[in-house]
Image: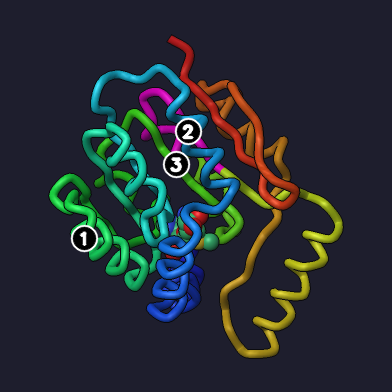
């Protein structure tokens, strides 16, 4: 992700959309694909009190729920300052603010300053970044055990929807674009980094995959 794209992401994911996402989470809980991603992590044998690195965690749904379930610590790195602020306020409201570190930036750029974690999550994040290779490579390098991620499926209605969204963005003069990346190429990045696919699931729109590091 270039500096420009990171700035576009910061503008796209603003305070208004963060507050809307939080209200929706309060009303309905996690979306179906996020629920699956969390359940797949919970089903995997991990050391006690594991740490999660939530890349592009948005309002922090994944780490809020994993910390309440038994994770010890979390780090969220996010390109949106507004989402980080809402996630931090929600962490404080839930009583686990001191167990979460928040860092603003494009993960691929700030990765060197971020500690490794047992589990790395990227829930609906690769679709915001033109350079999925760099992002997933950096994510894999930070994972001791698992990488769990979700992405839009390559179905034609989904590709058409993304094309329309991007056309509207262009008309409105906004720089942010969404992407439907090739699943096999994304898996290839993680496999070349020494991970193997352990579980696949998802909804009609979102695929969810879990990769682990063989011992
Ligand atoms: C569609 S939202 C998903 C938020 C949350 N994970 C969820 O599923 O509800 C994408 C999030 O990823 C962040 N993001 C996108 N590209 C990123 C990158 N390269 N590094 C860090 N954060 C990124 C955005 O700022 C935004 O908060």
Q: Position of residue 167 (x, y in %)?
A: 74, 79
Q: Which residue is mark 3?
A: 121
| 12 shown above or below 109 | below
Q: Nearer the viewer, residue 31 or 146?
A: 31
Q: Position of residue 207 (x, y in %)?
A: 67, 43
Earlier in the chain: of badge 2 and badge 1, it is: 1
Q: Position of residue 5 (x, y in %)?
A: 50, 69
Outermost left residue: 98
Give the side of residue 121 with respect to residue 76, left or right: right
Count of number-bearing discs: 3
| 36 shown above or below 80 | above
Query: Looking at the figure, which quarter contains the C terminus?
Result: top left
Q: Which residue is mark 1?
A: 93
| 202 shown above or below 211 | below
Earlier in the chain: of badge 2 and badge 3, it is: 3
Q: Which residue is mark 2?
A: 147
| 103 shown above or below 135 | below
**For the residues marked 2 and 1, what is the alpha-carbon distance in whole angstroms?**
28 Å
The residue that appears at 50% across and 59% down in the rendered structure is 28
Give the side of residue 149 with respect to residue 80, left or right: right
**For the residue with label 2, is its CB less than 8 Å from the closest atom of ligand 1?**
no
Which portion, as a residue range, is magenta? 139-149
């Amino acid at each position: 992700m270039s500096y420009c794209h990171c700035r576009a992401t910061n503008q796209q994911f603003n305070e208004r959309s963060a507050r809307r996402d939080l209200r929706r989470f309060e009303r309905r809980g996690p979306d179906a694909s996020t629920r699956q991603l969390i359940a797949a992590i919970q089903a995997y044998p991990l050391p006690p009190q594991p740490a999660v690195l939530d890349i592009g965690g948005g309002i922090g749904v994944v780490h809020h729920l994993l910390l309440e379930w038994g994770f010890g610590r979390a780090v969220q790195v996010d390109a949106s300052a507004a989402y980080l602020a809402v996630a931090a306020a929600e962490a404080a409201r839930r009583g686990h603010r001191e167990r979460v570190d928040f860092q603003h930036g494009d993960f691929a750029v700030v990765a060197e300053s971020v500690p490794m974690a047992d589990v790395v999550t990227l829930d609906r994040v690769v679709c915001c970044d033109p350079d999925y290779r760099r992002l997933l490579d950096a994510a894999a390098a930070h994972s001791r055990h698992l990488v769990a991620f979700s992405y839009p499926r390559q179905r034609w209605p989904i590709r058409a929807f993304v094309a329309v969204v991007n056309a509207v963005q262009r008309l409105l003069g906004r720089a942010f674009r969404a992407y439907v990346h090739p699943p096999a190429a994304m898996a290839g990045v993680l496999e070349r980094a020494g991970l193997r696919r352990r579980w696949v699931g998802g909804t009609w729109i979102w695929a969810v995959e879990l990769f682990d590091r063989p011992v």
